[in-house]
Amino acid sequence: MKVIVIGGGWSGCTAAITAKKAGAEVVLYEKTDMLLGLGNVGGIMRNNGRYTAAEEIIALGAGDFIHLTDENSKHKNISFPGHKNAWLCDVNKIEPAVRRYLKAMGIEVNMITRVVDVKKEENKIKGIYLSDKEYIEADAFIETTGSAGPMNNCVKYGNGCAMCVLRCPAFGGRVSISSKAGIEDLHGERENGVYGAFSGSCKLAKGSLAENIIKQLDEKGVVVVKVPEEDVNLDKLKQKVCQQYALKEYAENLVLIDTGDVKLMTPFYPLEKLRKIEGFENAKYVDPYAGGIGNSVRYLSIAPREDSMKVLNLDNLFCAGEKAGLFIGHTEAMITGALAGHNAVKSYLELPLLVLPNSLAVGDIIASENETMKTKEGRRTRFTFAGATYFKRMQELGLYTLDIDEIKNKVENLNLTNIFNTKLI
């Protein structure tokens, strides 16, 4: 059985692993020259409810990349405004580590290979077309193309192409595979009804900051610097993808996180104003390069799906990551990818598809997002274990815990221990 994964972000890479573990031949296509996509500028793991989710994923047998990010973390168990228990993964080391991991598992990874169309018969996709016109068939397909780009969307709904890590001008814009198969995509919205939302942070070159700031980052992992009163912009918080960081502290301060480069927790900040702040006189953006005026715009291409991650009205297309909903973060991408990969194999074998129970945070977030997405108001909500509406829900439902043994026992009582390690073929 052959599974094709389209998109090499955290969700696509995780889907490839669980499909491979289930016994499939797996081929992954990534249009750029790097895996992980937005994961190359992320790096925040295990903060708040993500700690619970990470341990649930491990207990379920899909913790490969949780372990890998743990191994590549620069700082562990740190706190910053609104967040506790955070581990900061070094984004300058993690991508090559993931690539080596996939290769060691025998997964075929094709870089700089853009999927542009599909061949469909009735309710099934038969194969994909690459940009060079090559046609490839498979038994099941997993779309993890994300929801940002192409360039015209960042122009229409943002401040133009900000030259982000996705690099649409160099490698081509995102192509919606579900749309090519005749399924109408859904869109996330902002408070004013405009589609999409800005990526929540930028990256600064560490060496461009003052030595005292670098020293604090190296030692503590976090630095908080007061913004001049005249530059405080509370309205910018409403534009962010990351509602878990839409707190007043993030408008009144520059919050810096050490994830290899320096993560500046704001969608964008004018360079001229940034350089007026003490310690930032020589500040330089490394992602996006136009971080002073804008950032990538996301949530512009979401596939309607079941809680099994199967795309509605298509028998053999699954989705994960932001393609599957208003999800934020690496941990969220990993669990949706794990489920999509596993169920892609189950669908081929005509076995009942796995739906993770709501008694687990990882199951509840998938179901809760799917239900919320059905309303216009719901399409303004974001879903992350790390904060905002969903973390509050986790706490109210008693799904949040730091007790690893409790998590293991809960998964075991559900007969789901190592389910994603199960060989099906």
Image (cartoon, grey):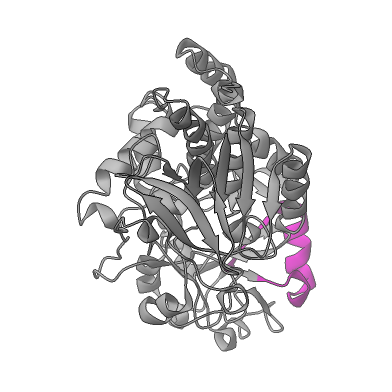
Residue drawn at x 44%, y 61% as measured from the top left: 147
Q: Residue 388 at x, y = what percent?
A: 38, 49
Q: Is residue 294 left or right of residue 194?
A: right
Q: Is residue 64 visible?
A: yes
Q: Is residue 55 left or right of residue 379?
A: right
**Near-viewer residue (82 or 258):** 258
x, y percent for residue 284: 68, 80
Residue 322 in magenta stretch: no
Of residue 382 and residue 226, the one placed in the foreground of this image is 382
Above or below, 22 relative to 167? above
Horizontal placement of 100 versus 49: left or right?
A: right
Residues drawn in magenta: 204-225
Q: On the rendered image, what quadrant is the N terminus found in?
A: top right
Eyeballing the image, is 214 above or below 118?
Answer: below
x and y percentages locating residue 49 in the rendered image:
48, 37
Q: Quadrant of the C terminus?
A: top right
Comparing 394 with 8, the one in front is: 8
